[in-house]
Amino acid sequence: MKIRVLGCHGSDQVLNGSRGAHQCRTCAFLVNETVLVDAGTVGTALRLDEQKRIRHILLSHLHHDHIQGLPTLADNLVDAPDEPVTLTSIPSVLKGLQTHVFNDKVYPNFLKLPDPRHPVFVCRPLKPGKESELDGLRVTAIPVNHLVPTVGFLIRDNGSSFLYSGDTYVTEEIWKVAAREPTLKAALIETSFPDTMTELARTSKHLTPSVFAREFRKIGRPDLPVYVYHLKPRVREQIRRELTGLGIAKLTVLEEGQEITI
Ligand SMILES: [Zn+2]
Ligand SMILES: [Zn+2]
């Protein structure tokens, strides 16, 4: 599997670094060019022909930083949708999109436009714990512990798989699934705040480096490649320093534009 990082931060922001300006964008990961995992970034990272190749979008939860690319994508595809893009998630997320986003108030209802028989988006509900097939990938949604109903995903192809945590605080089930998955090659795990902001992390149900380390240990594979994402840009350097200090063997902090082969 090839994972292309379109956005991997907990907010949008331009940062000045030693190599010039860097655009931090909210979370979206393109798998094998046709399956998008979360939709925080779409139109600002992909050409139109690349957007047209997306067939399925897996959504971890309804928070704006994970769905904000959907209206843009709909607008870009509405002229000539080849076939609908499938929005795939737990039922409460799909219902929330219809109630709060594509409700003809915040945005037109692209679940019926441009033609109810050929809309831009269709919804496909996932049952947590049950594997589903999407464009050659097998996907299992696993509930995690966040402010709103949220799932992470185990995503498998023939011989390999990776875990995507979604936004989460201290949780259990997803690490158990990871621990017993023999094909697991990598985990993408969120960390949003530095340890000095532990209280904010706890109330907003996100991880800090210390809590991340305790959660990662629950997989029981200290050598597993782990890719950290969802850092809040304003405290990114502090989080990076704290993550580096953990001494985890194969830890990478993700950057926009990076590609991972699993
Ligand atoms: Zn969230
Ligand atoms: Zn988020």
Image (cartoon, rainbow, N blue to C red):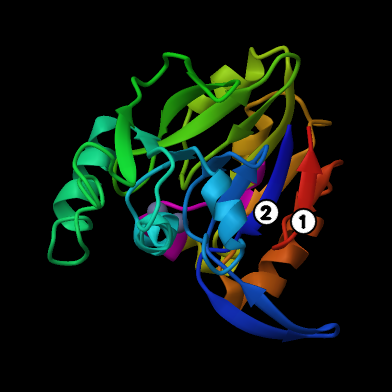
Judge by depth and name the residue closer to the eye, 40 or 45. 45
Q: Contact, CB < 8 Å: mark 2 with mark 1? A: yes
Residue 243, placed above or below residue 14: above
In which of the image's four quarters is ligand 2 placed?
bottom left
Q: CA distance from mark 2 to mark 1?
A: 5 Å
| Residue 5 part of the magenta-drawn span | no
Circle 1 — which element? loop
| Residue 209 part of the magenta-drawn span | yes
Most prominent secondary structure in the magenta stretch?
Answer: helix
Which tag, 2 or 1, sits closer to the chain's start? 2
Q: Quadrant of the N terminus?
A: top right
Examine the image and state in which quarter residue 86 appears.
Answer: top left
User: Which segment is the magenta one?
Assistant: 200-213
Residue 138, placed above or below residue 50: above
Residue at 63% across / 54% down in the picture? 229
Residue at 57% across / 44% down in the picture? 53
Q: Is mark 1 within 8 Å of ligand 2?
A: no
Looking at the rendered structure, the kind of residue marked 2 is: Val
Examine the image and state in which quarter residue 49 appears.
Answer: bottom right
Examine the image and state in which quarter residue 151 appears.
Answer: top left
Left-right relation of 97 to 57 = left
Residue at 22% across / 58% down in the picture? 101
Q: Which mark is residue 5?
A: 2
